[in-house]
């Protein structure tokens, strides 16, 4: 029979969304909340020190996923890190605070038929969740749980790349989350005094003392319990025992774009034919579960340098001491310190390319430590046309699912990335960066022409780790949740994480995911937020 428990709301997954949601829901003392996390604690030095982010990858704090062979990448499989610890991927990401373009949310409103997802309506949520070191204005808030700061000790090459992009004709943009997204500048980051400030730091740890909040780590949820068309709780394994947690109000899945569709399908909710193939009893035929997967692809352009020191050997005893004592020095770097948003074609209404500039060699997803002093311009496609899927390999919940990212299945994506490589080269050839950089290491200075570059893009493309849309929000037959994030056809069950995004935002996905959790908290608690009132707070 196992251990029986009862709560009002059970939240599965203590990642970017789950921590924010559990923190907000537990502000209501009448609500008894359980937060389940398959991974462990986030109290690790490699988590707290920003420059150590990749050291958590491929460890037991990482789900350590691998995609299926990708035909668009000559059959290569890609590594997908996903945080398996409190804070989820906000505890292992590059901390870049980007919302995406205003047009992204207006498109969500159009696709879902719900104006409350428009930028005008979600901007107050972004402002509410934010504590921006620059202060409050029309675009930003102070006093919220999520600390947002400028980098405290940016690398000198970061200043050089901004000046070089300006020299190449790109507008300077000090705030990618302000009036316009386009242009070049330094990123703001989710840090507090030079340390990572994850969703767990922002929302969960301040709430852990509340008597109405229970947080359980090492708890693998194996299925959602459904009775009479309503979610009544979950089963999970913890400490060698099977537990049943009953939910008198709601079950909320916040496992992310891989784990949420996986759990729905393990529970018999998903495409019926596929569930039968892997031996799962069909509870509710919902064809869109796991479909429509999107991710941002990245192509690294790397140069050797003439002189100067990259972040390759930043972890010296002196720099460690400087970071521990004052929260300063190179260990405060998020690696991708500066960025650029631009268009691959002038006729596009919004930017479709984002660049991450790293004062270090970033190659093969940091599988090996950098072996030389180098500089990286990571070309990222942020308006993605290709689609993939998440599917079960087995009815066993301990098996990793099958991830087909669908990279470059739409030829438009390949052409845009080739254009991005050419733009990176243009920036590198002018301004102060030109005197820093030496030979192009990859794709290589001798690689020219569209066909040759297409081949190199297929050969070197990696993931930026922004999977979304596998439990897409909408009202059509392929959508999984409605605009209130409720699973179609099952009462008392919501999905609240990046998987519900109707389309990928133009930019890093952490801040939008936390915003979705803020919105979900309002929906579950029955709160309505008037945009004008929220803006005046």
Image (cartoon, grey):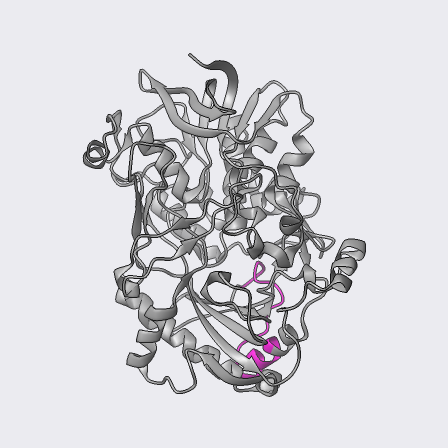
Q: Is residue 294 above or below residue 478?
A: below
Return the residue nearer the eye: 320 or 353: 320
Q: Is residue 275 above or below residue 151?
A: above
Q: Is residue 341 among what the camera can see?
A: yes
Task: Give residue 443's position: percent from left, percent from top.
Answer: 41, 78
Q: Quadrant of residue 382?
A: bottom left
Magenta segment = 161-180
Return the residue nearer the eye: 55 or 107: 55
- Magenta region's main secondary structure? loop
Kindly identify the residue that appears in the image at 63 percent across and 37 percent down.
Answer: 203
Give the left or right position of residue 175, taking residue 102 as reference: right
Q: How many marks?
A: 0
Return the residue nearer the eye: 6 or 373: 373
Task: Give residue 50's position: percent from left, percent from top.
Answer: 64, 56
Kindly identify the residue that appears in the image at 53 percent across and 32 percent down.
Answer: 522
Kindly identify the residue that appears in the image at 67 percent across and 49 percent down.
Answer: 45
Q: Is residue 123 among what the camera can see?
A: no
Q: Residue furthest right?
A: 325
Q: Is residue 228 above or below residue 387?
A: above
Task: Give residue 518's position: percent from left, percent from top.
Answer: 55, 38
Specify whether residue 166 is painted magenta: yes
Specify whether residue 63 is painted magenta: no
Quarter occupied by the N terminus = top left
Task: Give residue 120's position: percent from left, percent from top.
Answer: 51, 48
Quarter occupied by the C terminus = top right
Give the left or right position of residue 530, taking residue 505 as reference: right
Return the residue nearer the eye: 371 or 168: 371
């Amino acid at each position: 029979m196992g251990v029986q428990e009862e709560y009002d709301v059970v939240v599965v997954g203590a990642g970017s969304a789950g921590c924010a949601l559990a923190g907000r829901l537990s502000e209501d003392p009448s609500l008894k909340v359980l937060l389940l996390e398959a991974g462990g604690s986030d109290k690790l030095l490699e988590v707290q020190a920003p420059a150590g982010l990749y050291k958590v990858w491929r460890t037991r704090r990482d789900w350590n996923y691998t995609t299926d062979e990708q035909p668009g990448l000559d059959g290569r499989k890609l590594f997908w890190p996903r945080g398996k610890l409190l804070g989820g991927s906000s505890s292992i990401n590059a901390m870049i605070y980007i919302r995406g373009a205003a047009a992204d949310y207006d498109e969500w409103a159009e696709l879902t038929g719900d104006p409350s997802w428009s930028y005008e309506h979600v901007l107050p949520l972004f402002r509410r969740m934010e504590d921006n070191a620059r202060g409050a204005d029309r675009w930003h808030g102070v006093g919220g749980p999520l600390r947002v700061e400028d980098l405290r000790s940016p690398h000198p090459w970061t200043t050089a790349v901004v000046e070089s992009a300006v020299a190449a004709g790109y507008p300077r943009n000090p705030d990618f989350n302000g009036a316009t997204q386009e242009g070049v500048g330094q990123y703001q980051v989710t840090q507090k005094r030079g340390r990572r400030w994850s969703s767990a730091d922002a929302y969960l740890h301040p709430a852990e003392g509340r008597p109405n909040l229970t947080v359980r780590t090492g708890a693998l949820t194996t299925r959602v319990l459904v009775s009479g068309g309503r979610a009544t709780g979950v089963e999970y394994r913890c400490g060698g025992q099977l537990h049943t947690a009953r939910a008198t109000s709601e079950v909320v899945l916040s496992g992310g774009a891989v784990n949420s569709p996986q759990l729905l399908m393990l529970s018999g909710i998903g495409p019926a034919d596929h569930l039968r193939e892997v031996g799962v009893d069909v509870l509710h035929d919902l064809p869109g579960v796991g479909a429509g997967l999107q991710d941002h692809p990245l192509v690294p352009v790397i140069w050797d340098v003439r002189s100067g020191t990259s972040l390759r050997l930043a972890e010296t005893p002196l720099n460690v001491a400087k970071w521990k004592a004052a929260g300063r020095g190179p260990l405060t770097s998020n690696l991708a310190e500066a960025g650029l948003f631009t268009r691959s074609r002038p006729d596009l209404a919004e930017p479709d390319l984002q660049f991450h500039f790293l004062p270090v060699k970033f190659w093969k997803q940091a599988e090996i430590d950098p072996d030389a002093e180098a500089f990286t311009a990571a070309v990222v496609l942020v308006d993605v046309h290709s689609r993939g899927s998440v599917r079960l390999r087995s009815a066993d919940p301990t098996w990793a699912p099958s991830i087909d990212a669908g990279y470059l299945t739409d030829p438009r994506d390949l052409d845009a990335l080739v254009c991005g490589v050419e733009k990176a080269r243009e920036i590198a050839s002018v301004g102060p960066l030109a005197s820093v950089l030496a030979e192009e290491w990859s794709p290589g200075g001798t690689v020219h022409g569209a066909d040759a570059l297409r081949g190199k893009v297929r050969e070197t493309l990696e993931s930026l780790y922004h999977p979304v849309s596998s439990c897409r929000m909408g009202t059509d037959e392929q959508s999984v949740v409605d605009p209130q994030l409720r699973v179609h056809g099952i009462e008392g069950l919501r999905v609240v994480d990046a998987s519900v995004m109707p389309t990928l935002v133009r930019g890093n996905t952490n801040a939008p995911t936390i915003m979705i959790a803020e919105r979900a908290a309002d929906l579950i608690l029955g709160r309505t937020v008037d945009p004008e009132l929220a803006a005046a707070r």
